[in-house]
Image (cartoon, grey):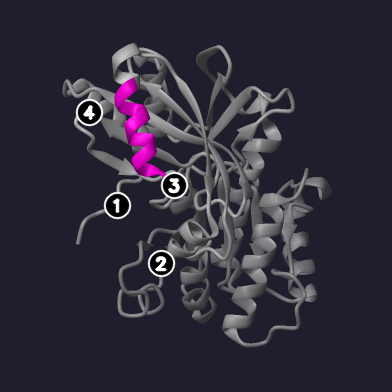
Amino acid sequence: MTKTVTDLPKLALDWYRAGRGVVMATVVQTWGSAPRPVGSQLVIDADGAMEGSVSGGCVEGAVITEALEAFEDGKPRLLEYGVSDDEAFAVGLACGGHIKVLVEPVGQALPVDVLERLVDARDQSEPVAYVTDLEKGGPRLSGPSSFADRFRMDQSGVEDDGRTFVAIHNPPLRMVIVGAVHIAQALVPMARACGYDPVLIDPRGAFGSAERFPGERIMDDWPDEALRALKLDARTAIVTLTHDPKLDDPAIVTALESDVFYLGCLGSKRTHAKRVARLQEVGFTDAELARIHAPIGLDIGGRQPAEIAVSIMAEVTQALRKAP
């Protein structure tokens, strides 16, 4: 089976360094049911080889033709295509739409040093925005402070001025689950389906076993040690499920000392009140403890493990996407 290439900026840089002429094509705007979202990319070399997609196959041929011409003059191109209903149906959509695609030859319209810094930031899991003027060109990189809402929403797009395109490159989302219990067995695949890289922490071998979680990453260190090793960041959600203060409390303390965007803890209101009292004793303030979502999950009346997992996943999504 052919492996899908996901790090297209790195591939473009590798191709360029190998002496292959390279063009980056990026979806910058969409209308209607466009086959691929804003930010989707296609890498093309001078021989017409390609990786990625800007339309699911509808207009790739036309983009490649424009890319081959861009090799000759080194200038960027802003292309607009309509995707018919028939073409959209062929790639699994109910109706068509329109897309704008920016074509940038690497080493010319797209300076190599900008691409190198973008690749390095992605390698270091640093959030970075690729910003360019669709009329004049001149790409640059910017940090989260300039486009806070776009980073929070993972939303690339054109600014209100109609010409500044911002491509958001966020580190991967992670969900760290403390307690390899039955709820975790339902939550892990849900998290992955929602774009998270799940990690399980449980020093109890009977719980955190490969038989119960085949193919998953399981850490058997004490929770606080494991969390510190994972280098928590603002793209990380922490879920504690053990019901055991000896395991949950060290994880909660470590999470509260970090900038994780979500911390949810299993347990009743009474259990959480006792938890809050213990954490107050070690010096946490009411404002810090208010970061904890407990009882965990949105109140949808769930009782079964899978239903509880659904409520957790919904609350994590809400925390990620809502305005601060």
Please give the label number shown on residue 4. 1
Q: Residues within 10 Å of mark 3 (few under 14, many from 20)?
A: few
| Front-lying residue, 224 or 61 | 61
Please give the label number shown on residue 15. 4
Q: Residue at x 74, y 76 (%)?
A: 268
Residue 130 vertical placement versus 32 (above, below): above
Where residue 143 appears, x then y in whole percent?
58, 24
Please give the label number shown on residue 24. none
Horizontal side, residue 262 vs residue 7: left or right? right
Which residues fall within the magenta stretch?
A: 59-69
Q: Amino acid at mark 1?
A: Thr
Where residue 6 appears, x then y in whole percent?
35, 45
How far is mark 3 from mark 2, CA to CA? 16 Å
Question: In the rendered image, which quarter is residue 120 located in?
Answer: top left
Where residue 254 appears, x then y in whole percent?
58, 49
- Local secondary structure at mark 1: loop
- Local secondary structure at mark 3: helix
Q: Residue at x 48, y 40 (%)?
A: 171
